[in-house]
Image (cartoon, rainbow, N blue to C red):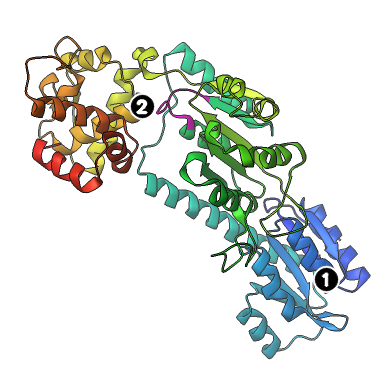
């Protein structure tokens, strides 16, 4: 049986009670580079779907005394994104319609040819590729971030990007370190896109964002009824990014109760859904990031030392923006052009005086703060060229900016403090939490001060 390799590699489950069909179909698919698991009966198919995440399945309609149609919803319940192709020697319009109604993606009558198999696989590969691209586009739109340009002059940043490109092709776990806002999540996404896993999903999990219980469910998944409120199965992020990359942001805040489970996954690539007694396997590359002194967290017994060793196979340090002053002007110009396009305003750039103000500011919020400042300028500034007078007052040199004890009103001090917090915070919610006020109050203060 000759084939022509054309589709990206898929994990495929073959379910057929005929030995020759299983062998022939497996050979055809493996020749094209796909990873195939073949089983002969209903129960084994359900068990395999419970152990690992497949992207495609060929299912015979007659499996001994069992009906393959009944298998379709069970497979989709375990793996919601699975594309099922029904194969049968008893083809009819009624069975085809019923198979599609239950969730099958395609239908092939026996005897089938290699060309038919190849076409079915190619169609599934194209659909999965489009689904991954759509998810990535939706993620980008949701974040509303400009494309990151990794061209830089800073030697420290050049070293970080060079190392990231060098290790992208490997499957080694990577730990990204750097202050908040230095671009760790952007670099993680770039590493995924530079890797052979680029056509597969990238899942992002923020470790501090959820309670330990919800975070465990988010990562590993749960089955229906596992706990109060678990009204349906949740495959979890690990299963959802099978073959791709899992990015764990702020890993230093991972709850202690989950650290042994993550360690097991990193060691054996095995995990268990909440409420499920058997282990699952997953082929997922892990990238983690932290902005804390994680060695100090180990010393204080807030983070497991063995987990740090597993995470820290490749360490990449991202420099703070204050150590990348040679890159500052180019970064500011690119951000201004991006937000100018978003706001239908064409800018001619910054004056030398404005660039000098930007260079003298310490940027405690790093790239995130710079992004927030430039976005505000692009929205509010009517001029085509940005001068020092158009920059927020919070960027003024420290000897000019108001501070505690200066002979200024509380209102002026409050305004400058709110401006600085807004410039460095990830979101309005985070800014409100830092300031100790609710979002409605923050909205009124912004309106009051024209922020």
Q: Is residue 366 above or below residue 241?
A: above
In the displayed orientation, state which residue is furthest to the top: 399
| 194 with respect to 326 (left or right) | right
In the displayed orientation, state which residue is furthest to the right: 19
Q: Which residues are magenta?
A: 177-184
Crowd class of label 2 (few under 14; some 14 to 19; many from 20; radius 10 Å)? many
Q: For residue 100, which quarter of the picture?
A: bottom right
Q: Nearer the viewer, residue 278 or 382?
A: 278
| 27 with respect to 375 (left or right) | right
Position of residue 103 measured from the top left corner of the image (x, y, whole percent) = 62, 75
Q: CA distance from mark 1 to mark 2?
A: 53 Å
Q: Nearer the viewer, residue 298 or 285?
A: 298
Quadrant holding the C terminus: top left
Q: Earlier in the sequence, mark 1 or mark 2?
A: 1
Q: What residue is shown at x 28% (from left), y 33% (from top)?
A: 372
Quadrant holding the N terminus: bottom right
Q: Is residue 182 above or below residue 134?
A: above
Whether residue 183 is in magenta: the answer is yes
Q: What residue is shown at x 31% (from left), y 20% (from top)?
A: 363
Q: Is residue 323 visible?
A: yes
| 355 with respect to 334 (left or right) | left
Q: Which residue is mark 2?
A: 367
In the displayed orientation, state which residue is furthest to the front: 300
Whether residue 361 is in magenta: the answer is no
Q: What residue is shown at x 9% (from left), y 39% (from top)?
A: 448
Position of residue 232 measured from the top left corner of the image (x, y, whole percent) = 58, 68
Q: Which residue is mark 1?
A: 43
Q: Main secondary structure of the magenta part?
A: loop
| 191 with respect to 118 (left or right) | left
Crowd class of label 1 (few under 14; some 14 to 19; many from 20; radius 10 Å)? few
Q: Nearer the viewer, residue 196 or 48?
A: 48
């Amino acid at each position: 049986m000759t084939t022509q390799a054309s589709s990206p590699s898929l994990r495929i489950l073959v379910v057929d009670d005929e030995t020759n069909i299983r062998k022939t179909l497996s050979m055809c698919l493996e020749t094209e580079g796909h990873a195939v698991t073949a089983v002969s009966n209903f129960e084994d198919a359900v068990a395999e779907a419970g152990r690992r995440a497949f992207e495609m399945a060929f299912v015979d309609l007659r499996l001994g005394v069992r009906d393959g149609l009944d298998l379709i919803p069970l497979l989709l319940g375990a793996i919601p994104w699975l594309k099922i192709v029904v194969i049968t020697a008893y083809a009819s319009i009624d069975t085809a319609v019923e198979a599609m109604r239950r969730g099958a993606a395609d239908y092939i009558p026996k005897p089938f040819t290699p060309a038919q198999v190849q076409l079915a696989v190619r169609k599934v590969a194209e659909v999965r590729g489009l689904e991954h691209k759509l998810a990535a586009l939706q993620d980008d739109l949701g974040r509303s971030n400009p494309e990151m340009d990794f061209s830089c002059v800073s030697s420290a940043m050049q070293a970080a990007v060079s190392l990231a490109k060098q290790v992208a092709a490997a499957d080694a776990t990577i730990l990204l370190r750097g202050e908040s806002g230095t671009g760790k999540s952007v670099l993680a996404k770039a590493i995924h896109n530079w890797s052979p896993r680029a056509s597969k999903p990238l899942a992002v999990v923020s470790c501090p964002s959820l309670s330990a219980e919800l975070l465990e469910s988010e990562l590993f998944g749960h089955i229906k009824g596992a706990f109060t409120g678990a009204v349906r199965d949740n495959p979890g992020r690990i299963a959802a990014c099978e073959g791709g990359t899992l990015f764990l942001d702020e890993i230093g805040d991972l709850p202690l109760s989950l650290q042994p489970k993550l360690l097991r996954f990193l060691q054996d690539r095995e995990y268990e859904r909440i409420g499920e007694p058997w282990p699952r396997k997953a082929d997922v590359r892990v990238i983690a990031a932290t902005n804390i002194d994680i060695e100090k967290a180990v010393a204080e017994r807030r983070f497991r030392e063995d987990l740090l060793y597993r995470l820290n196979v490749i360490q990449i340090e991202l420099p703070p923006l204050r150590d990348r002053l040679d890159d500052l002007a180019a970064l500011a110009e690119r951000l201004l052009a991006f937000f100018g396009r978003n706001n239908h305003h064409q800018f001619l750039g910054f004056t030398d005086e404005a660039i000098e103000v930007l260079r003298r500011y310490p940027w405690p919020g790093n790239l995130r703060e710079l992004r927030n400042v430039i976005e505000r300028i692009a929205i509010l500034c009517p001029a085509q060229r940005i001068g020092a007078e158009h920059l927020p007052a919070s960027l003024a040199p420290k000897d000019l900016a108001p501070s505690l004890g200066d002979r200024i009103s509380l209102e002026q001090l409050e305004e400058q403090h709110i401006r600085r917090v807004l410039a460095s915070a990830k979101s309005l919610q985070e800014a409100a939490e830092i300031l100790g006020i609710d979002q409605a109050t923050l909205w009124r203060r912004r309106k009051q001060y024209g922020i």
